[in-house]
Image: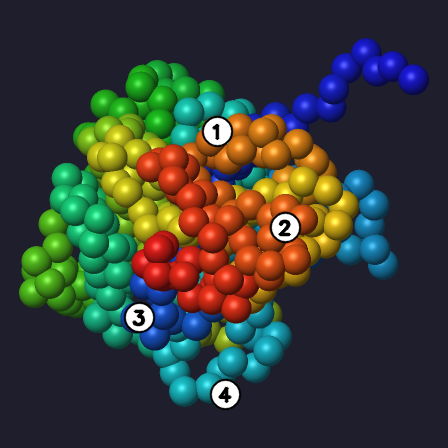
Amino acid sequence: MSFKFVFQRPRGMNDFLFDEANFLLSLKEEIIKYSQLYSYHYIQTPVLEEEGVFTSSLGQSTDVIQKEMFYLKEREGGIKYVLKPEGTASVIRAYLQNGMHSLPQPVKLFYLDRMYRREKPQAGRFREHHQWGLEIIGSSDPIYDAQIIQVFDRFFKKFKLFDYIFKINSLGCKKDRNKYLKDLKNYYKKNLKNVCKDCQRRYNLNPLRMLDCKEEKCKEYKKNAPSLINYLCKDCEIQISKTLEYLDILEIKYDLDQTLVRGFDYYQRTVFEIFFPETNIAIGGGGRYDNLAQYLGGKVIPAVGGAIGLERLIEILKIHNVKLKMAKSAEIFIAQTTEKTKEYALKIYDELIKNNIPVLENFSKSSLSSQLELANKLGVKYCLIIGHQEIGNKTAILKDMVKRSQEIIAINHLTQEIKKKLKL
């Protein structure tokens, strides 16, 4: 049977292989250790959620809801399921469903997950991407708004990254925004013909989203738009002032960007995004979402969080030539020559692995020269050779692939000697 084509990966999604896969894995390991250092507990939610988890919380006028959701074709019991486009709503759903309100508050959670958005694939934007998220649920104290930012800031500094900025704003509470939106609509009304079609649509659906527009022709109008921060009530003024005060104490760089809004309707009060000069899109962001639990059927539960796209973070790390601590690669190759020596080599291989010594092999080959050639290509320091004579003598030949020397080692001392040579 012959095939006319080879199946391709889905558009806007990536295969991570070898070095790239190891880099991603090492980055995740660093993130896990770092999140736990700050006492965040790992949470994993399903890749699928009911459509309502997002349609009731993100906002019907957002691009994610209107055109970026991946739906399952079939319904189950009349329920529509979608691939998860973001992590916060899923975490709050899990918080409510699993009775986490009974735990000591606030509850600190982190996740490493894949998100799915049916958007146009382009630089820095994928239909499947990895995300590191932090959520603090159960407190309205602005110190936690600052702490979310602190964790990301200290993580960057850990890798000697300093040239970035946190853009911060306050969206106020619902009352603040209602007053503000009247003036915002009046401002845009006279310029409505000059903005992009999406902004013309947003004008009636959700004018606040006009400040989130990335189109060049709309940027000038965004700059001159009225500032929401001038409409804040006393409580919201205190919230943002205290957040900025804590950031000053922590010596974290930020810009107060009065045009900054986030893409989802559940955000209120503090919002932020993270920018590096090497990219024109944010690598992450977040903010406060005190009403999200209420949208999902619970009561009002104060909460704040943030997330970073790992693909965008990896791009920054590579630009700055950041090296991550990778799992140690194998430095020894085990070679054999016949079926009988293969059985003996398999036992040795198993014993070395039990002692946490990484070992390479190709037991499907029987030619010693081809195995030594492969060991050379793989760049190992040593090759362990097993022949019939070694079986009879209960020994093994350890060949130094760099010095081109070799020695005979008794099997009962083999693990100890290899550890000594590899400095394990």
Label 1 is placed on what type of residue? Lys
| Disc 2 secondary structure class | helix
Label 2 is placed on what type of residue? Gln
Horizontal side of 213 relative to 332 (left or right) equals left
Horizontal side of 122 relative to 239 (left or right) equals right
Using the image, determine if residue 137 lies above or below residue 189.
below
Which circle's residue, 2 or 3, is located before the other in the chain?
Answer: 3
In the rendered image, which residue does mark 4 sit on? 102
Residue 298 pos. (x, y %) = 55, 74
In the rendered image, which residue does mark 1 sit on? 377
Q: Kindly report which numbered mark, 2 or 3, lies closer to the viewer in this rendering.
A: 2
The picture quadrant where one finds residue 309 is: top left
Q: CA distance from mark 4 to mark 2?
A: 68 Å
Label 3 is placed on what type of residue? Leu
| Disc 3 secondary structure class | helix
Residue 118 pos. (x, y %) = 59, 33
